[in-house]
Image (cartoon, rainbow, N blue to C red):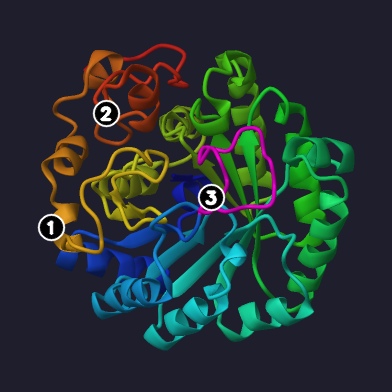
Amino acid sequence: MVHLRSLFQKAQMNKVESRCRKAFDAYGVSSILWNVTYECGLKCKHCYVGETKKRENELNTDQAKKLVSLIGDMGIPLLFMTGGEPLMRKDTLSLLSLCKEYGITTVLSSNGLLLDSEKIGELKRNNVHFLAVSLYGPQAQHDETVGIEGAYNKLMKNVQEAIEHDINICFKTVVSSYTYDNIPYIVNKGLELGVKSFYFCDLLETGRAQGEDGWRVPKEKWQKLAEYLFSKVVVDGEAEIDLGACPSMATLALEHFQKTRDVTHAVERLEHLSACPIGRGPLGISAKGDILPCIFLQQLSVGNILKDDLRQAASHPLIQAIAQKNGLKGACGACKYKRLCGGCRAKPYIIEGDIMGEDKTCMLKSVEKQ
């Protein structure tokens, strides 16, 4: 994930980030992204999970609590709880409470429809750091994308109530042919409401989007979107702008901003974190407990939390090979930015079955050779 504002607006490392670095130095793991369930009441046509029904062998409550305890005992400070829809699980609020006991910073990713005043109050009491909700455009476009009439109005009502409880909100969306024109609306709506973060994820042709070539946004439009988002970093700099499954946006941003400002801080951050974070601290956990190099690669496991050691999984040869970037192929292997970026590893695996393959969605207009 690329954090644009953090790259180009130098600030002192916050407490959570400092703890993440300490956890990575100690265990090779800095944060966990956990699909707590695959079950969801929406029908989003791009969902990378695919069929959003509860599946066999999802972690039960005791197993889920043991996972949270393990994360806490290891001192891993940051947990992203996603799905499916996490609130489809009846024990999610109790898991958040356990996270609070361990001092784990939590981000809850939700479609926002199962929230009510009581649950919003629980999120606040359990110190949820961010409530990340999906928004795909104005009412008609949002409802059509998620397949549920009335979803937009209910989401907006719950978002406004959460903001009244001083809960930080992140608006998430997928960058696709059917959401692209809605992105300025999403940003402006968020800034109007006081949203603290935006997450734009490139479309991955997996799950429900498998085989849907026409849904991808061409590079020319991504270039225009990049210019728009870069302007927001400068003009409306209070909100973070995060970019998923598009690590080359970081190197494109370097080339853009180095003309007008010092990018030393950005380079230092990318040298430590890398725009594609596999092997740099984050690990995924599937709803079944599979340990994943990347949460978008649900079919690629390096172990299972019920029987394998999380620390050993972090040092798995596949993860280390990606982190070292020596085996990258094609343009990614030849690019001067490979240590800072390395390309999205999920895309070549999904498209060609080669996790070290070239990321053909690279945003740079021309790849510069080393």
Identity, as a three-letter code, of the amino acid under mark 1: Gln
- Disc 3 crowd rating (10 Å Cα; few below 14, some 14-19, many 20+) is many
Start-end of magenta stretch? 38-54
Disc on res. 338: 2
The span from disc 1 to disc 2 (Cα, nearest Å) is 26 Å
Q: Earlier in the sequence, mark 1 or mark 2?
A: 1
Badge 2 marks a residue whose secondary structure is: loop
Q: Is residue 138 above or below residue 329?
A: below
SS at circle 3:
helix
Any part of residue 223 in sight: yes
| Residue depicted at 62% across the width and 36% down the height | 174
Question: Is 7 a magenta residue?
Answer: no
Hey, which quadrant is residue 67 in on the image? bottom left
**Disc 3 target residue:** 5
Give the labeled residue for mark 1.
312
Task: Say which amino acid is labelled 3.
Answer: Arg
Residue 268 appears at what percent x and percent y? Answer: 30, 48
